[in-house]
Image (cartoon, rainbow, N blue to C red):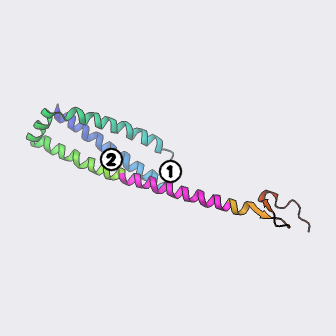
Amino acid sequence: MLTEQLSQLLESIQVLQNLLEEEKLCLKEKSFENLNTLLFNKKKLLQKINSSNQAISTKDNLIVIEQDPALSSLKQEIVKRLTECQKNNEINGRLVELSMKSNKHLMQLLTQAKGKNSITYDQKGLLNSGSLLGNNIEA
């Protein structure tokens, strides 16, 4: 039974690894259509992994796992893959931060460009908005 629980936990972690790779691809390519679904699935999977881990991590189970070489090996593989998932999740977090900074910078540039182009001066030196351009032009 414990072998089955550990195997299911490992399988869930492998699915998580795949989700993190898909998430990274979406973030790199700025293809956000599927990102919301991926994030929802990731959250559900993390909850499942957490509950499975809590069920397995009783004091008695941990003693059995440490004494059985096959179970101990399975546990080490789980820990290794979870560490990889944490690293990949951190990378994805950095990609999100960079994307947000890039978008903020772009918005600032667009706001500045709009501001510069929308204000002009009339013959008396008074400010006019750009929307008035071309209204009183005589050739």
- Point out the stretch of residues depicted in magenta: 90-113
Residue at figure coordinates x 22%, y 32% from the top left:
55
Point out residue 31 in the picture as x, y percentages from the top left corner: 50, 50
Label 1 environment density (alpha carbons within 10 Å; few <14, some 14–19, many ≥20): few
Residue at figure coordinates x 12%, y 32% from the top left:
60
Front-lying residue, 128 or 43: 128
Front-lying residue, 60 or 78: 60
Helix, strand or loop for disc 1? loop
- In three-dimensional space, the C-alpha distance between marks 2 and 1, rounded to whole angstroms, equals 19 Å
Give the amino acid at mark 1. Answer: Ser
Location of mark 2 (residue): 17
Q: Answer above or below: position of 34 versus 130.
A: above
Residue at figure coordinates x 57%, y 59% from the top left:
106
Give the amino acid at mark 2. Answer: Gln
Residue at figure coordinates x 38%, y 41% from the top left:
42
| Secondary structure mainly formed by the magenta segment | helix
Front-lying residue, 124 or 1: 124
Q: Is residue 97 left or right of residue 18?
A: right
Q: Answer above or below: position of 110 versus 19.
A: below
* Quadrant of res 45: top left
Helix, strand or loop for disc 2? helix
Point out residue 77 in the picture as x, y percentages from the top left corner: 20, 47
Q: Is residue 54 left or right of residue 133?
A: left
Instruction: Report the quarter where the N terminus lies.
Output: top left
Q: Is residue 131 left or right of residue 32?
A: right
Answer with mark 2 or mark 1, whichever residue precedes in sequence.
2
* Quadrant of res 113: bottom right
Location of mark 1 (residue): 31
Point out residue 51 in the picture as x, y percentages from the top left corner: 28, 33
Instruction: Report the quarter where the C terminus lies.
Output: bottom right
Point out residue 87 in the picture as x, y percentages from the top left corner: 32, 53
Label 2 environment density (alpha carbons within 10 Å; few <14, some 14–19, many ≥20): many
